[in-house]
């Protein structure tokens, strides 16, 4: 079930020796299950102006540390919402290019 490889992406903002902002990307690779967006969830989100595309399931909610982007199959997705279900966590995402 958890046979999809995704990268959870976070950013750190620092400044260099000259005071110029430097943005560092950190990716963590985890295994996830892939689930489609339910019809009622899709239409409810559309009514609110959102476009959910995929839902990833992580077997342990501790694997998710609040990252706002996910890379899957060389495409970047923004996190729309998360839902914890016992020890698992569902992460609903939408494509950056589709905003």
Image (cartoon, rainbow, N blue to C red):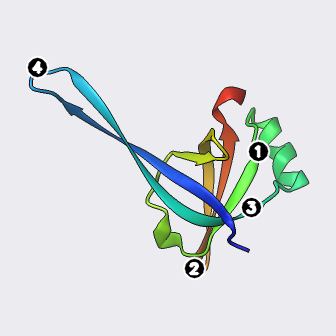
Q: Which mark is residue 34?
A: 3
Whichever of labels 1 and 3 marks the residue nearer the N terminus, that label is 3
Of circles 1 and 3, the one toward us is 3
Q: CA distance from mark 3 to mark 2?
A: 17 Å
Quarter of the rendering containing residue 28: bottom left
Residue at the spot of label 4: 18
Q: Secondary structure at mark 2?
A: loop
Answer whether labels 4 and 1 touch (C-beta < 8 Å): no
Q: CA distance from mark 3 to mark 4?
A: 44 Å
Q: Secondary structure at mark 4?
A: loop
Q: Secondary structure at mark 1?
A: loop
Q: Is residue 21 left or right of residue 73?
A: left
Q: Residues within 10 Å of mark 4 (few under 14, many from 20)?
A: few
Whichever of labels 3 and 2 marks the residue nearer the N terminus, that label is 3
Residue at the spot of label 1: 53
Q: Quadrant of the C terminus?
A: top right
Question: What residue is drawn where x is 69% and y is 68%?
Answer: 3
- Specify whether residue 99 is in view: no
Q: Residues within 10 Å of mark 2 (few under 14, many from 20)?
A: few
Q: CA distance from mark 4 to mark 2?
A: 45 Å
């Amino acid at each position: 079930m958890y046979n999809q490889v995704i990268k959870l992406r976070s950013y750190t903002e620092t400044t260099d020796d000259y005071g110029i902002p430097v943005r560092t990307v950190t990716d963590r690779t985890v295994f996830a299950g892939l689930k489609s967006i339910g019809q009622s969830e899709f239409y409810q989100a559309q009514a609110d102006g959102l476009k959910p595309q995929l839902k990833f399931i992580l077997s342990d909610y501790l694997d998710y540390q609040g990252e706002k982007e996910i890379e899957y199959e060389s495409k970047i997705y923004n996190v729309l919402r998360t839902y914890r279900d016992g020890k698992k966590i569902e992460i609903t995402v939408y494509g950056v290019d589709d905003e």
